[in-house]
Amino acid sequence: MSLEHYGIARSIGMQTYRLAVEKGQYPFIPALDEMLKGGPLLDERSLGTIDVPLCRVVGTKGAGRQNAFAADFMPILPEDTEFAAKWAALYQSQLREGLREPIQCYEYMNRFYVSEGNKRVSVMKSLHAISIRGSVTRLIPIENESKENKIYFEFLDFYDATSLNMIWFSEQGRFKKLVEISGKKWREPWTKEEIQRLKVLYYRFRAFYKELGGDRIHLTTGDAFLIYLEIFSVTHDLDEPFHNLRQDLVHIWSEFQSQSRDDGINLLLEPIDKQWMNTITSWFSISDKAYKIAFIHESTPQSSSWSYQHEMGRLNLEEHYHGQIETSAYAISLEAKDVDKVLERAIEDGNRLIFTTSSTLLHPSVRAAVRHPEVKILNCSINSSYSAIRSYHCRIYEGKFIMGLLAGALGKSNSIGYVAEYPVYGMTANINAFALGVKMVNPAAKVVLKWSKLKDSSLNPSLPCETSFISDQDMITPGDHSMAFGFYHRTEGKVENLAAPLCNWGRFYGKIIESILDRSWKNVNPKGASSHNYWWGFSAGVIDVIFSSRLPEPTKRLAKTMMDAMSREEFQPFAGVLIDQLGNLRLNEGQVMEPMSIIQMDWLMDNVIGFIPTEDEVVEEGRQIVRLQGIR
């Protein structure tokens, strides 16, 4: 019976061997000594006897038994050899009492190379075992700038905190992301229960992922696992039925496929050039049913200026199409964690188009979308890579550039203030665009940056007294009598509002609804990308600037001239020579910055005094949005 199993294992090995030869690849297991060839190492340390994940065992230490195995560690020597007899005996011993003696191996770059116990590894791999006990020596390479080396040193910190070695990622930063999702701080030690919980969940995931065809997707199991954790914000108990996890994977399989292809993000910078109301009106003329649309806010419009802006957009739609579209608003109680229930209720209420108006609702939006593909769901965020939903946002940095022009023109000192909230995608572009506007009319002026949502006030001193012209939050909540919003002039105990950039969400939503009803929604993918982000600005007619009568007419005329130029796409703030705070050249003369570079901007202009805070430096209630959309 054991020799029969050897024959089965050998046939698999020979198939792997022949396939490697056909592709011009090395057909045997690699030898670590050949790979290193006496090259320098940073350190060598013993890890003791640990569980070695068999999926990470890839070779042998020396070349002695190298040619006895195909690259998948299956045997390839004939069945009448002494090697085959010993392999079969080990197989029989494993079935009878288990292999108790640990193997001896070396770990290099989180791959394992066996110095003693190659046949035991081969037997256990043929039985589809998860791990094998091994006495491990870790060989640590010298640090360098290669991507794999950087990933490995990040892994070392992860291992020191968790002792977990079965997970591997293809990009730097993903071990840190895994720690964040798990609710831990980087380098914080994990408890035995936390380690066991993640280990069991990972191996459950791995089994179903492979069963469903994960080996045919160009995505590491670790990368797929992280996508799953992000989308489902996993809170599974260890005794949860296996079929729930499998069903989740079926739902998000298209996400694995699209991210494995690395299709990229399709930034939709302009809507289709049509009058935004015509097609909707035409569609309504032949339909006797109102089109049901839901707006889901992270908080009530009475308590949040952000939700208030989007609610005004919804009411604008209702005003234009009273009786023709039916909209409804739902407010989430994040404390009650009822996001998924609210989304399900909106779908049960018959809504076939849902706008979730905050990036904090991104992952619940994806969960709802993969479970209800018949419903179109859009989330108000930028730089989202999910194919199940679309995202949208205003290029508000264009309006901030106009505020900078006004500030540079009106400022009586060379100190201009800017108040920002969270270091998320787009926020740094807003700051830098404002700074460029200031510089265009007053090259000597400096922009003093203050963050309003830092937990430690010592990191965030008040704006200097001479800083009297300030750009602040763009809107306040209803009932808030503060005048500190938009661009204003601060004098002794008095605030004079001068201008404010606003996104016309009603027009934005109308244009998206039009694209759905005239079916141009489907024709937005000329580059083959699977993730679509609407990012519209002046040229789409979705950004407005409110000017105060206090503004001098020549200054207002300058601002409107630049707005018209941006609307006609004749001017772009991020163009020409751009230099950051450290003196680095970020853009050359004659160049225009790519949209994705603007979104992901993580540096400040040379005329900005201030810094970009980390997630740990913001207030507790802002951590989630920074975790989801933070530029760092």
Image (cartoon, rainbow, N blue to C red):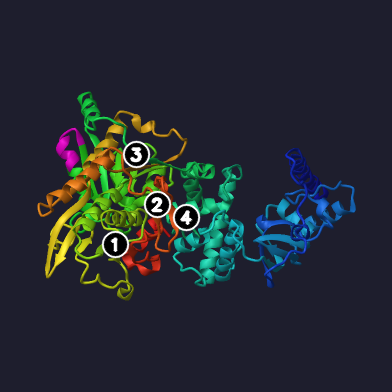
Of callouts 3 and 4, the N-terminal one: 4
Of callouts 2 and 1, the N-terminal one: 1
Q: Residue at x 59, y 60 (%)?
A: 145
Write the start and end of the magenta stretch as one range.
Answer: 316-325
- Does 136 sit left or right of 176 as displayed? right
Q: Could you say where residue 114 lies in the image, as x and y percent from the top left?
A: 75, 61
Q: Residue at x 21, y 31 (%)?
A: 277
Tag 4 residue = 229
For residue 577, which numbered disc appears in the image? 2
Q: Closer to the camera: disc 3 or disc 2?
A: 2
- Cα separation, mark 3 vs mark 4, equals 23 Å
Q: Could you say where residue 496 lies in the image, as x and y percent from the top left?
A: 12, 60
The amino acid sitting under disc 4 is Leu
- Does 63 sit left or right of 521 as displayed? right
Q: Secondary structure at mark 3?
A: strand
Q: Cβ–Cβ below 8 Å for labels 3 and 1?
A: no
Farthest bottom residue in view: 458
Tag 3 residue = 376
The amino acid sitting under disc 2 is Val
Q: Could you say where residue 346 lies in the image, as x and y percent from the top left?
A: 28, 44
For residue 444, which numbered disc appears in the image? 1
Of callouts 4 and 1, the N-terminal one: 4
- Does 95 sit left or right of 615 as displayed? right
